[in-house]
Image (cartoon, rainbow, N blue to C red):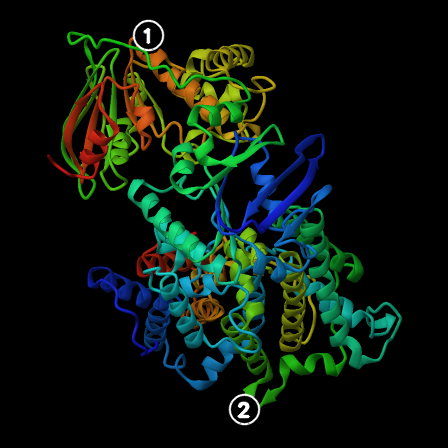
């Protein structure tokens, strides 16, 4: 907070305003107490929980999902929607890899240089985003329906091209980012952390980032202020697609292969993480830092359930319940109706 | 006027949207330093002219000039903003951002990273310069309507424009706030700012403007100094025919008629307290007061939109459940809510469907609705209220403000209510529509309904048999028919003689 003196205002008005600012500041961080509670609870569940190794593991496992949350948060803040991100997580790496591996390994037979696999993958992700943007902006279609259809189309494309098979014989360079260790931590954590940091700075301190809030808050007002609304939204969809493709690269590297179902079902977790982290489904509200806390909550819950030995069949139920509880807590702490 | 330089001119502007011609060779010329009113009925082309003068739309024919120079190209938004500022009818404030960021939207910084502290400081300076007493660090969504409007004016002027368009700025303000706005406009005029002022309230035009242009049916009708144009002639120019002022019917309230709507000891924390009210059949009771008087909250409690803390509401002899609209309607009440867009109609549904929502159960058996009977009722309503439409199947969203409001009236009157509550019925509607809406209230009273009319317009209240004046949540005066403006206003402002 600033220490500069504000111009004198009537004290009766100034007092509640002061409180409101602080509440507003805390709104980004309403999940911090939840995270603290989870850390304490986890340490009681299993002594392994609070070890460096376990926590690093949690972060690495969540890094791909975190990137999808980042992409979705950017799009939600700009007042739009993208359900197709989860399908891009599987399809973009599959297509990128198939362009470089031989037919025998399941490729197209083009056998482009292996080093191109990642750039091609990111390009495919960007193209999916660009096509979404094209349909939504040019045809004035609802983002929800367009990306719902695209979610099915993109996943269907992956199934068709791979004939429903998993890809295992991947170039070493493609697996590197998801499996390497830099300075004692998995590269995936560094990459995800760096992208979150970049997004936090861009949305907090740069005009183009602030324009997402303006567009999501009131697109007409943004247009009247000279923001090129359609162009910015289009770029946001493309960036979202590229980030989702990168999430696919990290996930592929971590698991060592691309299954036919990579990414399927992630979008619900991504939405849940973004929304419990304070990002509004109506656009214009929320922060990237908040979305990150949302991912952390989900990752910690998952880890605790695993350590506790909860059977896989019951995990879904517990997840759902935890999300509802987190929503209620952030509603009570934030004090405003959820939207 | 000493200066004869034209701050802004629009010459021979024609603009078509598909089959409709929004402007047909119309023009306007505003002399530097004057406050110029633009008046016309809904659909006269005012909004289109505003978007052409602000560079948001390109005219099909004609040209816009600022200070004698041709207007900049449409793509050059900055150049437009340096010439003309506009406070639009629709708010362009983003509620989820702070006041400071709204002021510097898309120009938070010249280049590079945003320095939030420096931006807040600039925002405070700007607010101070225009005398706007608002904290720059709070969210714009927490401001009230008046503060948001001041914020828009300050932002509009901060681009350096010396010409500002105010598109219906008074529509959502209450009396004292309007006066403060006018004081501000006069101060701006003294600093040499040219203004174009759009309003449906003609008395405001006389109060704050030096000259007036009238538009009708996409054409420019006349431009003249306000002093040369009496009120009645201004109305004639707007409507294109000689219309008399609304003739208020004379009615003698029958003191022995049954009470159809009553409130006893009604109170709502922070809004109003201990209100007693009785409305007899055939009587129209007005509720007057400033924006903070609690009159709207009281009316909303009568119809069940709000739940009172204490007291009871009786409709037609039945004590209704508090805060429950269906039970009030079942007891025989009809109402026109304050915000027609929000509570008045479902925009995508047809006129007939909107008008028959409360009587749907009467249009068929076992929960079914007969479309032909619905159409029939819709057609009756269209005739009775003189709704300008292509037919009962037209969606309400396509209607002009005045006609949409008539549909809201149709809904309120659908079940021939014994008690009617009408809140600000004439806000944002033109002169002719206003007359038929007031006529509809009087018709209902003639049919034996008792009505409560809440209005910010003194003119509307003249149809009332008596007016209850509220001040800070209490009824302070019961004024019988035949009051003068001064009498009512002094009571509304809480001045006792």
Tell me the residue that label 2 is attached to: A184
Q: Is residue B309 left or right of residue A212?
A: left
Question: Do dots 1 and 2 share one subunit?
Answer: no
- Crowding at mark 2 (Cα within 10 Å: few <14, some 14-19, many 20+): few
Camera-side residue of A21 and A165 = A21
x%, y% of residue B459? 33, 26
For label 1, count other residues whose C-alpha is less than 10 Å away and answer few (under 14), some (14-19) or many (20+): some
Q: Residue at x 86, y 67 (%)?
A: A108
Q: Chain of mark 2?
A: A
Task: Give B63 or B148, whichever is nearer the viewer.
Answer: B63
- Residue appearing at x 48%, y 59% in the figure: B157
Whether residue A22 sits left or right of residue A68 in the image: it is left
Q: Closer to the camera, B9 or B249?
A: B9
Residue furthest bottom as drawn: A183
Q: Is residue B297 visible?
A: yes
Numbered disc in front, either 1 or 2: 1
The correct choice, above or below, for B79 with respect to B2 in the image is below
Q: Which mark is residue B447?
A: 1
Q: Indicate whether B331 appears above or below A102.
A: above
Residue B86: in sight, yes or no?
A: no
**Residue A97 image offset from top left, x and y in percent:** 77, 72
């Amino acid at each position: 907070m600033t220490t500069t003196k504000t111009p004198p205002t009537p004290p009766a008005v100034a007092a509640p305003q002061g409180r409101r600012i602080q509440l507003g500041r805390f709104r980004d961080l309403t999940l911090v107490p939840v995270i603290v509670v989870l850390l304490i609870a986890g340490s009681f569940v299993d002594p392994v929980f609070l070890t460096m190794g376990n926590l690093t593991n949690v972060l690495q496992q969540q890094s791909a999902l975190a990137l999808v949350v980042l992409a979705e948060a950017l799009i939600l803040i700009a007042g739009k929607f993208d359900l197709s991100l989860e399908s891009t997580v599987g399809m973009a790496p599959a297509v990128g890899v198939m362009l470089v591996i031989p037919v025998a390994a399941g490729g197209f037979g083009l056998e482009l240089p292996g080093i191109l696999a990642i750039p091609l993958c990111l390009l495919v992700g960007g193209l999916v985003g660009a096509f979404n943007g094209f349909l939504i902006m040019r045809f004035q279609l609802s983002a929800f329906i367009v990306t719902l259809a695209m979610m099915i189309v993109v996943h269907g494309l992956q199934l068709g091209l791979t004939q429903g098979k998993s890809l295992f014989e991947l170039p070493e360079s493609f697996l590197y980012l998801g499996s390497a260790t830099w300075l004692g931590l998995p590269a995936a954590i560094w990459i995800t952390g760096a992208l979150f940091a970049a997004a936090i700075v861009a949305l907090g301190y740069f005009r183009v980032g602030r324009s997402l809030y303006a567009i999501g808050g009131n697109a007409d007002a943004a247009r009247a202020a000279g923001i090129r609304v359609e162009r910015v939204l289009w770029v946001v969809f493309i960036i979202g697609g590229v980030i989702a493709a990168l999430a696919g690269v990290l996930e592929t590297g971590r698991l060592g292969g691309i299954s036919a179902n990579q990414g399927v079902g992630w979008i619900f977790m991504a939405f849940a993480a973004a929304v419990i982290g304070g990002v509004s489904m109506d656009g214009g509200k929320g922060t990237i830092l908040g979305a990150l806390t949302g991912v952390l909550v989900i990752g910690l819950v998952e880890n605790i359930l695993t350590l506790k030995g909860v059977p896989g069949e019951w995990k879904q139920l517990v997840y759902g319940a935890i999300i509802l509880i987190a929503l209620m807590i952030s509603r009570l702490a934030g004090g405003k109706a959820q939207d | 006027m000493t200066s004869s330089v034209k701050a802004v001119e629009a010459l021979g502007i024609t603009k078509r949207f598909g089959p409709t011609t929004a402007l047909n060779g119309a023009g306007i010329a505003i002399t530097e330093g004057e406050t110029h009113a633009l008046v016309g009925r809904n659909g006269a082309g005012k909004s289109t002219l505003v978007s052409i003068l602000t560079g948001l739309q390109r005219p099909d024919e004609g040209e816009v000039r600022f200070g004698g120079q041709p207007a900049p190209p449409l793509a050059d938004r900055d150049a437009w903003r340096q010439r003309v500022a506009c406070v639009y009818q629709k708010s362009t404030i983003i509620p989820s951002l702070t006041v400071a960021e709204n002021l510097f939207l898309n120009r938070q910084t010249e280049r590079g990273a945003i320095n939030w502290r420096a931006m807040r400081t600039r925002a405070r300076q700007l607010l101070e310069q225009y005398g706007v007493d608002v904290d720059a660090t709070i969210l714009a969504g927490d401001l009230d309507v008046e503060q948001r409007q001041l914020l828009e004016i300050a932002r509009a002027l901060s681009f350096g424009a010396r010409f500002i368009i105010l598109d219906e700025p008074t529509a959502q303000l209450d009396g004292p706030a309007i006066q403060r706005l006018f004081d501000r406009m006069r101060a701006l005029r003294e600093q040499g700012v040219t203004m174009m002022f759009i309003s449906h309230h003609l008395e405001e035009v006389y109060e704050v403007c030096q000259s007036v242009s009238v538009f009708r049916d996409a054409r420019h009708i006349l431009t003249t100094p306000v002093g040369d144009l009496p009120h009645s002639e201004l109305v004639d120019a707007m409507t294109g025919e000689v219309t008399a002022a609304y003739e208020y019917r004379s009615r003698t309230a029958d003191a022995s008629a049954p009470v159809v709507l009553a409130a006893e000891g009604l109170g709502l924390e922070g809004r109003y307290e201990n209100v007693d009210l009785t409305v007899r059949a055939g009587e129209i009771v007005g509720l007057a007061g400033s924006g903070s008087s609690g009159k709207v909250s009281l009316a909303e409690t009568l119809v069940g939109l709000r739940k009172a803390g204490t007291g009871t509401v009786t409709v037609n002899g039945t004590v209704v459940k508090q805060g429950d609209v269906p039970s009030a309607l079942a007891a025989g009440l009809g109402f026109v809510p304050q915000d027609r867009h929000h509570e008045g109609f479902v925009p995508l549904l047809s006129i007939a469907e909107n008008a028959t929502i409360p009587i749907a159960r009467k249009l068929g058996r076992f929960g079914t609705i007969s479309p032909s009977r619905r159409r029939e009722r819709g057609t009756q309503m269209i005739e009775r209220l003189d709704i300008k439409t292509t037919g009962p199947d037209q969606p309400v969203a396509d209607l002009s403000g005045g006609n949409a409001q008539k549909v809201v009236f149709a809904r309120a009157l659908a079940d021939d209510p014994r008690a009617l509550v009408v809140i600000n019925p004439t806000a944002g509607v033109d002169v002719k529509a206003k007359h038929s809406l007031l006529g509809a209230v009087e018709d209902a009273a003639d049919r034996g309904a008792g009505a409560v009319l809440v209005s910010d317009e003194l003119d509307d209240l003249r149809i009332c048999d008596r007016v209850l004046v509220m001040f800070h949540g209490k009824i302070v005066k019961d004024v019988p028919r035949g009051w003068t403006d001064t009498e009512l206003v002094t009571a509304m402002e809480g001045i006792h003689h």
